[in-house]
Structures are given as C-alpha cells and as structure tokens.
Amino acid sequence: MKRKALALATAVLCSQANVVNALEVGVILDAYHKSETTALGGRTEGFGSSHSELSLSQDVANFATAHMALVGEWNEQESDLQLEEAYLQSSALPGGLNVTAGRFLADIGYLNATHSHSDNFSERPLLYRAFLGGHYFDDGIGVSWLAPTDRYWRLSAGAFTGDEFGEEGSESSIGTWTLSTEFGDDIGNNASWQMGVSYLSNKTQTSGHHEDEEDHDDEHEEHDHEEHDHAGHAHGAEFQGEKLYLTDLVWKWAPQGNNRQQQVKLAAEYAYVDDIYGAEFDHYDGWYLSGVYQFDENWATGIRHGRVNLAEEHEHDGEHEWEASRLTETSVMLSWMPTHTQRLRLEYKHQDADHMEGTDNAITFHYQVGFGAHAAHSF
C-alpha cells in the first residue's frame, strides 16, 4: 500500500473537527470456492475471498461526507490488502453540483462506480476485467452535475493521477481523465431505463513509458520469466490504449415499480479501446449482455454472455509476434438471499477462445454477508 494512500486516508478521517453525526461502520465478508481458474483474472481456483470490505463514513459538519474503504482479497496462492477509497464528498453545493476529492471509483460505465458486492454475478464482465482491471479507482478529483429536469440527466468529469490504472505509475500529474453522461426515465408504472456514455483518456504511457526499444526489450525479457495465464488478482488494466469509450443501456421491470418481490433486469455494455499501447493492432473492443430475473423475494437467476477482441503476443521462431485473439464467456447463476444482507450464489462459467491461454469452465459457490451501515445501491 502506497504511503500517499495511507496519508490520504489519515487526512480524510482526521479532518473531522466539526462532526455532527456518529461514525458509520460497514463490513462485507466475501467467501467462495471455484473449481477452476478462468482467463482474465477474477477469482482463482480453490477457496478464497475476492472482495471483503471494511468501510467507514462520517459527515463533516454540514458540507461534506468523509468515506474510507479497505478491501482484502485472499486465495490459496496470495493475499492482498488495499485502500480502495478515501475521499471527501460535498453535500451542500447549490445547483445540483457535487465534488469528490481523494481516492475513489471512477464514474465511467454502468458498473465501475459501484462496489462489486452489489453485482449480479460473481465476477465482473470480460470487458471490465480486460480494460479496467475489474474496476478502476485512483487518486484525483471529480465533479458531477445533476440537471434540474423531469428526465434524469447527470454529467460527470474526473482527473486522476493514473497510478492505479496499470502496473506502472504515471510520470505526469494527471495520468487519466474521464467524462461521462447518463440519462433515464420511467416507462409507465412498471418499467424504467437508463443509458450512459463514457470516455477515459489514458496518458500514463505517453509520458515516458515504453518510449525506447531498450525498455520494450526489457519488458519482453521480464515477460518471458513470468507466468502469464490471465488469472489471479487484477491490479490495473492489462489491455490498454490511449482512449477508452464505453456505452451502456439498462432496462428494469417490476410490478408497480416495487422490486422487492419480483424484477426483470436487462443490461448491456460495449467498450472500444483506441490507440493501443504495445500491440501492433488498431483497437480492442468488447461487449456483454445480461438478464436477471428475481422471481421471488429470496431467489434470482440470470445469464450473461460477452466477448472481448484483443491481441496476444506469442513467440515464433525466436521472434515475438502479435496475433489477434478472442475470448467469449457465458455465465449462468442461481442466487438465494435468505435476508437482505446475505447472498448465496451458485454459478457456472463457460469460456471459449481463439489464440488465448488459460480458458476453462468453472463452477463457483459464492457467499456474502454484510454488517452495519452501507450506502444504497444505484440504478
């Protein structure tokens, strides 16, 4: 864990001289068993925990909220403890404005700004694991504006150091910046929809990284001595470019809008990565489509199908060559929620690939339980 991240967390939690509300503490415990390791990160084979979380939140006078989240991951090969969030967020600005400063989840795509324990499946879609390392958080500042309109419309922008986006930190003060908008509305009394468009500019490797052939050769040599099976904990985006475009569409249906007993949710996202770093290809792209049916207060089932089109480096006759690769993944899940704080999930995953190693089929048993306070989930 970096020193500046620890200093940031200390500053956030110690800046509360005029606190008026009690400290809110939340805990999420995550445990799973997975039969096989599958491609592109996520959960690994065996027993483990992918996203156990300790969160602390408190109001600062009447103008802001301080929040910190510490996340732990464990499996049979390694363990990791990381400061995922440590920020101050305004709560009293006029005109629908909101400012966030510190370490936080970037507001891009449909899923990135949400915690993974609120997901409908045990792992994020392929495009998130390939292009965002599962989820992208970083140190920076963000601004959002909620329009005073009858139809929901929100704009947001962020500037980040870029140190958490890849394996290497950024040499510039602003390594990445984001811009996004989302809007939605109701359809009668039973249905609603939301659509979003996002953009991420990645300058982390144009400010001094991989600029000369000697550095590039050193990377190949290091790469040859490491296992590269697209599995294990995700630490930054593995497939990067200078530009990332995202678009998402979500539709929900529930009787009279009450999703406690019954709900249908359809979600789709598409990602396009341009100006690729390191690979002799024009672009990467990926998509997924998911459907979840909550047929009872305690039970839900769902299916998700997605694909990413990438480029893999292979050695042929002593030379490194780039080859187009494709990974397709289908997940089917059944979820039981005995209480609103507990979830037991059984999930089957099937992967199929061209020119990519590490693909497999897997069965995952997944259990989550929450304690204490936790923020409401978004649309």
Image (cartoon, rainbow, N blue to C red):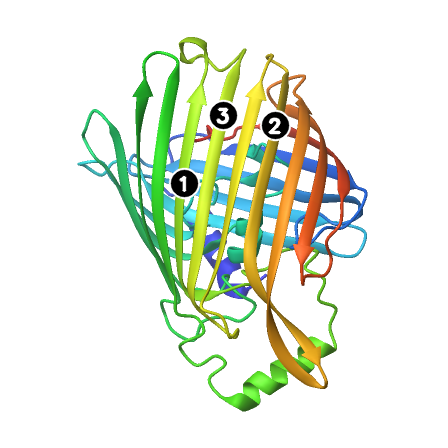
Circles 1 and 2: CB distance less than 8 Å?
Answer: no
Element class at badge 2: strand
Q: Tell me the crowding category of disc 1: few under 14, some 14 to 19, or many 20 or more residues within 10 angstroms, Cα based.
A: many
Q: Nearer the viewer, residue 370 or 127?
A: 127
Q: CA distance from mark 3 to mark 2?
A: 9 Å
Q: Residue at x 35, y 49 (%)?
A: 198
In primary-sequence order, the first of circles 1 and 2 is: 1
The residue pinned by badge 2 equals 302
In primary-sequence order, the first of circles 3 and 2 is: 3
The residue pinned by badge 3 equals 265
What amino acid type should be assigned to the residue bearing mark 2? Gly
| x and y percentages locating residue 166 in the rendered image | 53, 65
Circles 1 and 3: CB distance less than 8 Å?
Answer: no
What amino acid type should be assigned to the residue bearing mark 3? Lys
- In this rendering, position of residue 341 left or right of residue 45: left
Q: CA distance from mark 1 to mark 2?
A: 18 Å
The extreme bottom residue here reads 214
The quadrant of the picture occupied by the N terminus is bottom right
Q: Quadrant of residue 16?
A: top left
| x and y percentages locating residue 218 in the rendered image | 62, 85
What amino acid type should be assigned to the residue bearing mark 1? Asp
Q: Nearer the viewer, residue 17 or 82?
A: 82
- In this rendering, position of residue 133 left or right of residue 339: left
Q: Nearer the viewer, residue 288 or 186?
A: 288
Residue 248's disc number: 1
Could one spot residue 157 in this view of the protein? yes
